[in-house]
Image (spheres, coloured by chain):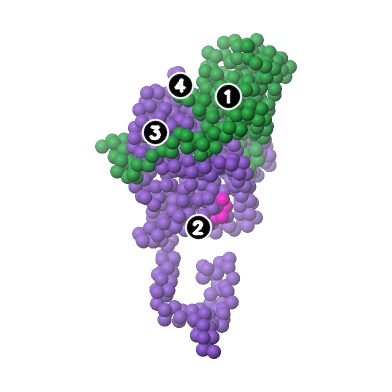
Chain colours: A purple, B green
Amino acid sequence: MNTGTKDHARRSETFNQDEARVNWHDETLWFVRAKRDKASHSIPEWEGLRGMASWIKDNVLSDLHRYLLQFEENAIQNGIQVHWAADAEEHNRIVHQILNEKGIDRIVKSKSMLTEECHLNEYLQGKGIEVVDTDLGERIVQLAKEPPSHIVLPCIHKKKEEIGKLFHEHLGTPEGMADPAFLTAAARAHLREKFVTRKAAITGVNFAVAETGEFVVCTNEGNADMGAHLADVHIVCMGIEKIVPLRRHLAVFLRLLARSATGQPITTYSSHFKKPRPGQTMHIVLVDNGRTTQLGRPDFRNSLKCIRCGACMNTCPVYRRSGGHSYHTAIAGPIGSILAPNLDMKKYADLPFASTLCGSCSNVCPVKINIHEQLYKWRQVIVQEGYSARAKTAAMKAMSFTLSNPSVYQFAGKAGRTVLKYVPFAVNNQLNLWYKHREMPEAPEQSFREWYAQNNKT
Amino acid sequence: MSSRTEILAKIKNNQPEFRPLPSEDLIFSGSGGDYTDRDNIQENTETFRTVLTNIGGAVIELHNLAEVGAYISAHYGEGQRIISTLAGLSSLCSPGWENDDPHDLENVALAVIGAHFGVAENAALWITEELMQQRVVPFICQQLAVVLHKNKILATMHHAYDQIGDAPYGFGAFIAGPSKTADIEQSLVLGAHGPKGMTVFLLTEEER
């Protein structure tokens, strides 16, 4: 690939070296997918809900200008300060400025994929600010100096023994201790100390209601609430697509979100923040970072409906067997492979090809994004723009030439059969990418055309 | 040009042709909110109990608040800090905690609060700021207990938001069960950061 960085296929190869581990990863995610199925099947009107969610989001995207102004006006009226950031850099600068003005250099942060997308942690650390991720999975990958590999299950790629080792090094748990309950209790004690001593908390947003100016944050652990309700300053980082028009629309989305994500009927906490608590300051940073561009791409704008449940990852045969880190972007999996090329088509040219186009992602998506169709469309755009892998482009061109010239096609078929029959080692080797994980077929004696000509004579 | 102006201009230029919202009625019926058989209180209570138990919580049916007080006294000993926002349980707690710095609630063993209503389909309880006194209360305590009258359980989230309407809360939360995580190899552990357990006391006696 002409990206300069290792592409999805190369990274997957590394991931696939440990077959037992790949199988474990695959099965763990399939287990989550199965829980999602069970939860969705228990709701007879599930398909109706998906339809409504998609419809509401259609309206949001078509009237986003008005909704954002309405949300801003209501939020300000509620006593929240609203900021606008065109890109990741501006977002990071605004967050830093808020902290700097208050003289705060140690903060807690609950899960926000937007801040991962903007690389906020690295930025703040560069400015001398300590950021502690408080979601257990995120804390684990933070201690391991890795990015999350899944948007809902950040350390799904890690074995409990590895986590035990990390905790032994950083939190002083006994060596060799790998019991999940014990490790969770250790993290609880470690993070409680952070919650009660940090003056500022950053959270993300799951849904923001234009009608009321409130926003909803969903967690199971309660870490967003522990951070926000104990901090003097609450900074809220939000992508502009998180809007829902009316408060009552939350019913539709909250019914879908956790069931799609983990198979739970709802997350433990669905917290509706409308006003800062007395004495607290609350800031919302509204972030574009490519979203307005995606809004202008008719084939891809539906990706902005995403509510970040992760169902498309759990069901994806490629994600499950290649791992989140192979996608080299903040949001992995099928949806991430649609979002990333919008930000940088060249850098992420490989991602739309990391799919079998089986369509399972589209079938589980709670807001009915046509994920696999968009992946297919991105491939076309990427090839047209000249960003596809050289080997793939050359092969495609050769195939296109062959298939559009009957005599060349006949010759190529004959040559192929001859090679497979007499010199199979010419194709059964590692230089032939098609041969990887596949046996080449036995060559038939003749082509259909030859057979037809012969049998028509008699 | 400020980023705000720039972003809004780009949106105006790039957003697709207007698509109207589905009607309120359609959302409610199309998403299954109008099932009349779901108005059955008995059924809602049973569903609530099953779902809450499945997600790690517990339901205890008692007649009235006095019985709740007796139950708690029997299960919590000296030296365990209990706080409650319910006037009927004030004898269980040391007074004045409402004005504490929220950080000082870190050692609360049990918080007992009320809820506006429960939701059968997911065992979530709708609790707003005034029922918490301090926002951090239901999150920072080691154990959370919620007292609710049995006839205040609604069928679905659609019914829930119908009930909430345009209520002017500053903060409100649906809380369903104890704090939990499965981040380590998908093993479910109760008590991630918040309460390790959640008990819902369902009162059966008519309120006087």
Is disc 1 in contact with disc 4, using a CB cutoff of under 8 Å?
A: no
Closer to the chain start, of discs 1 and 4, is 1
Amino acid carrying mark 2 in the image: Leu
Residue on which disc 3 sits: A285
Seen from this angle, which residue lies furthest left?
B1
**What x and y, as percent, mark residue A86?**
34, 39
Mark-to-mark CA distance, 2 and 1: 44 Å
Mark-to-mark CA distance, 3 and 2: 36 Å
Instruction: Please tell me which residue is depicted at 61% across the width and 16% down the height of the picture.
Output: B83
Residue A387: quarter of image:
bottom left
Instruction: Please tell me which residue is depicted at 61% across the width and 33% down the height of the picture.
Output: B37
Query: Residue B117: which numbered mark, if any?
Result: 1
Relative to the observer, which residue lies in front, B35 or A8? B35
Seen from this angle, which residue lies furthest right?
B74
The segment highlighted magenta reads A315-320
Amino acid carrying mark 4 in the image: Pro
Residue on which disc 4 sits: B168
Task: Confirm whether the magenta stretch covers residue A191.
Answer: no
Task: Confirm whether the magenta stretch covers residue A317.
Answer: yes
Quadrant where the N terminus of chain A is found in the figure: bottom left
Residue A290: quarter of image:
top left
Query: Residue A357: which numbered mark, if any?
Result: 2
Q: Is residue A290 above or below residue B179?
A: below
